[in-house]
Image (spheres, rainbow, N blue to C red):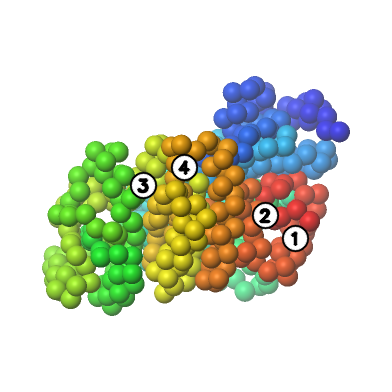
Amino acid sequence: MRDFKVLEEQLRAILPAQLVRSDTESLTFYGKDWLMDFTPAPSVIVLPETIEQVQGIVRVCNALRIGLVPSGGRTGLSGGATATKGEVVVSLERMRKILEINRIDRTIRCEAGVVLEQIQKAATEANLYFPVDFSSRGSAQIGGNIATNAGGIRVIRYGNFRESVLGLRVVTGRGDIIELNGSLFKNNSGYDLRNLFIGSEGTLGIIVEATLRLTSPPADVARILVGLEDHHAILPLLTFCRDSFTNLSAFEFMEKLPFEEVIARRGLRNPLVGSYPAYALIECEVASQSDRDHIMESFGLAFENNLIKDVVVSESSAQARELMDLRDLISETLSKHYTLHKNDISVPVPLIPAFVDELRRSIREAYPTFQVAIFGHVGDGNLHVNILKPDDMSDQDFWNACHNSDHAIFNTVRAFHGSISAEHGVGLLKRDFIHYTRSAEEISIMRSIKAAFDPYGIMNPNKLLPKE
């Protein structure tokens, strides 16, 4: 039986008193992420300020065989930062220093608790650019971004978070502090352990420091909103944009329902003349007026060729921001006004229209009263599927139905050679569904990797890998 009194005493022996909390308010606040499907039940919250303190916490929990849940901004939607069985929650929010910006090799080194927006601003102040971006930029912390291999709107040009990570410093489940690649751009001396931690969801250790790549900032961006005949028009338009613009940086897709919900609920202006079954929001980096002229001419051609039904191109930074809000605010808006069941999935880009057709058919067949809102990053095959609870259905009946509907959704994902998690991670929510994406052999290898870094199984237990 776990002795939580001894646990708290040992943690207080290595941390100042104010950094160890067990009051109800703290346990509730730090014990969960944005997913509300699971009830938080941590034993203690710790807020280390140094790497050595993190190491001490891991060693205490190893000795007592008590689980740890690494915690960043807790903006995840898979329960990956939720403590449900008396674990110690390790919040990195006090480790928020930017340690170095190196203009020679264009890197930034920071502690894991730094929020994404702070990295973006620091890069801008150095006349550089950190391109990864998503709507939770003001809350999401770098350690969590790396641990879930976050994506966002510019993956089509700059890749997932993995492509921006040069080096890591981590505390493993064994309690060892190890440096993974440092600031090397080339390193072929054995296995790349850094990449194992990217997307590991805190199951191998705790990321405490990162060195990230920066790049040159774009002179400006133009954003283009188009109305489409239906979601089948998305692939011809994507091909057209890739052929027409070498500086294409984002290609976002929205169905009618989420698009119109944002406009109605947030009091935003619809810049298009009519209403359409589907929409695309496109971003291009521009360096001159000739780039803007080329965009205008190209979308005029797209209209003439019936690739699009309507179009507006931003003419100012304010209008560009307004257009991005139409996509950026969807998730927050739907979550505020509906009880939702969310799925973050990916399929090969050429299969997206057929996948959406089959997905809707399977959900409609099982649950004809459910409304489904689909949007996402079509340029990299990542779709966010949101099921809205009917007004006349109880929460419990809805969650039970959604659990069953997940099997239909994931069977469709598997049939289309996709993934049950594109950028939000597996966590608790999808742990028991990972076999839809990963083979038994792959899962066995993952277990072996976890055992090497975390022999006692204390790191984010019961997440990512299904129970044996």
Q: Is residue 6 left or right of residue 258?
A: right
Quadrant containing the N terminus is: top right
Of labels 2 and 3, earlier in sequence is: 3
Q: Real-space Cα distance between discs 1 and 2?
A: 14 Å
Label 1 sits on a secondary structure element that is helix
Residue 389: numbered disc: 4
Labels 1 and 4: the sequence-earlier one: 4
Name which of mark 1 and mark 3 comes first in the sequence.
Answer: 3
Residue 211 visible in the snapshot: no
Q: Which residue is mark 3?
A: 330
- Give residue 236's position: percent from left, percent from top: 30, 74
Residue at image coords 46%, 42%: 389
Q: Residue at x 66, y 63 (%)?
A: 435
- Compared with 90, 348 (above or below) is below
Which amino acid type is marked by label 2?
Asp
Evaluate if marks 1 and 2 touch, with contact meaning CB atoms under 8 Å apart.
Answer: no
Amino acid type for the residue under numbered disc 1: Arg
| Residue that carries the numbered disc 2 in the rendered image | 432
* Image quadrant in which the C terminus is located: bottom right
Alpha-carbon distance for marks 3 and 4? 16 Å
Q: Nearer the viewer, mark 3 or mark 4?
A: 4
Residue 246, given in percent of the width and then of the height, sits at 29, 73
Q: Which residue is disc 1 drawn over?
A: 447
User: Residue extending furthest right?
Assistant: 1
Q: Which dot, 4 or 2, sits closer to the camera?
A: 4
Task: Choose top left, top right, bottom left or bottom right for residue 13.
Answer: top right
Kindly identify the amino acid type of the residue bearing the numbered disc 4: Lys
